[in-house]
Amino acid sequence: MQKRSIGKSVFMVNPIGLGSMGFSEFYGKPTDEAEAIATIHASLEMGVEHFDSAEMYGMGANEKLLGKALQGRMQDIVVATKFGIGRDRTTGAVTGLDGSEAALRRSCEGSLKALGVEAIDLYYQHRMDPNTPIEETMEVLAALVTEGKIKAIGLSECSAQTLRRAHVVHPVAAVQSEYSLFSRDIEDDIIPACIELGVSLVAYSPLGRGMLTGNYNAKNLDLSKHDYRHTSPRFKGDNYTANIALVDVVKTIASQHDAHPAQVALAWVLAQGEHVLAIPGTTKLSNLRSNMQAARVHLGDEDMAQLSVLSAQVKGDRYGDMSAVNR
Ligand code: ATR
C-alpha cells in the first residue's frame, strides 16, 4: 500500500496502522502478554508501521507492552501515545483532564520510560482540558520538541477551533478522532481544517468499535462483562438493533468484492483522501491479517453511494458522556 505522511512531519507510513488499546483493556480482559507480543511482531511482518497507544490504556500497561514488543525495532516505525486523562490508580476511574505543564511533563517522562525510548514519535493530547488554554499546553509540547523528548504533536478529539489555535503555536501533525462509516460528524469542520492546515486525520474506531465487522448480529452481542461497549449508546437496546441492521449494506458490498465487511469499512475510510490514516484495533492475528489487506478493496461509485447514506441513520451518541469530545 502506498505510504502516507503524518502531517508535514518526516513520517511516511502504511496508512493502516494498529490501535493497540484492546490488548490492555476496554474490549474485555487484557490479552496474554506473550500472545500480544507475538501479534505485534507479526504485525511488523505484515507491514504495520504505525502503532497507537495512550498513557491511560491499562494505566501504563499498554505503553509498556509496546515498549517491550518493539524494543530494538522502533527506528523505522511510528509509535504514538497520548497524555491528559487522569485515572485513579486503584479503581481506574477517570479523575479528570489535565493539560497543565506539571501534568504533561510528568506524563511525558512516564511514557518515555514505559516505551523505553528517548523520544516519543507522535505525542497527542488525548482530550482537551477545559481549564488550561490550548496555547499553554502547546507551548509545553513545543518545548518538549525542542528538548528532543517528542518528535511530533497531535491532538485527539479536538474541535476545529482548538486545532487552529494550537497550530498557531506549533504545527500539529495529526488530529486523531473517531471516523468511520458510522461516525462522520468531523466532516463538517474538523476535516476541512485538517486539509487546510496540512494536518493528518488519524481515524480511530474505523470499524465502529467492531460493529462494522459483521461479527455481531441482532441476537448475538456476546460481550464480556469487562467490555466497555456495555456503556455505549450505540450498542444498547433499540439503538443496537437499528444500527446492526445497517451493517447488512456493508456485508452485501463486501460479498460483492469477495472481501470482509471490516475491509470495506477500512477501504471507505482510506478512500476519503491522502490526509487520512486508519488505526483499526485488533488483538487477533487473523483479523489483523485481514485488515492489512483492506487496501485491495476498490469501492466503486455505486458502493460509495450506498455507504454514504448510512451514518445519517445511525442511532445513539458515540459515547454515553460526550462532554469531553470536540472541545
Ligand atoms: P477501536 O479503535 O476502539 O479499537 P475499532 O477499530 O473500530 O475500534 O474496532 C475494534 C474492534 O473490532 C475490536 O473489538 C476487534 O476485536 P478483536 O480484538 O477480537 O479483533 C474488532 N475487529 C477488528 N478487526 C476485525 C476483523 N477483521 N474482524 C472482526 N472483528 C474485528
Image: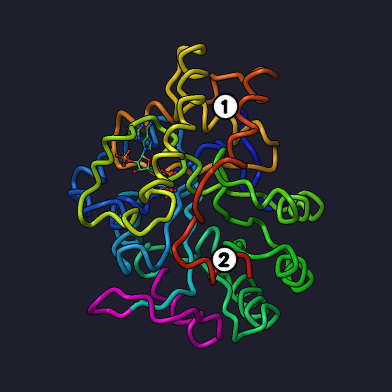
Q: Nearer the viewer, residue 50 or 113?
A: 50
Mark 2 or 1: in front is: 2
Give percent across and percent down for residue 256. 51, 11
Is 64 left or right of 274, judged from the image as shown?
Answer: left
- The residue positioned 57% from the left and 54% from the top of the image is 177
Q: Are marks 2 and 1 in contact (CB under 8 Å)?
A: no
Q: Nearer the viewer, residue 37 or 219?
A: 219
- The residue positioned 35% from the left and 77% from the top of the image is 87
Q: Is residue 289 above or below residue 223?
A: above
Residue linked to disc 1: 1
Give percent across and percent down for residue 61. 28, 63
**Sequence-first tag of 2 and 1:** 1
Label 1 Cα crowd, 10 Å radius (few <14 / some 14-19 / many 20+): few
Q: Amino acid at mark 2?
A: Val
Which quadrant holds the N terminus?
top right
Magenta residue span: 88-111
Residue 316 on the magenta span: no
- The residue positioned 31% from the left and 61% from the top of the image is 64
Q: Is residue 73 above or below residue 64?
A: above
What's the CA distance linking mark 2 and mark 1? Answer: 32 Å
Is 170 left or right of 281, judged from the image as shown?
Answer: right
Q: Nearer the viewer, residue 58 or 307?
A: 307
Is 1 left or right of 114, judged from the image as shown?
Answer: right
Q: Quadrant of residue 46?
A: top left
Residue linked to disc 2: 325
Residue reaching furthest to the right: 196
- Provide the secondary structure element on which disc 1 rests: loop
User: Label 1 CB, ligand 1: below 8 Å?
Assistant: no
Give percent across and percent down for residue 225. 20, 55
Image quadrant of ligand 1 equals top left
Q: Quadrant of residue 181?
A: top right
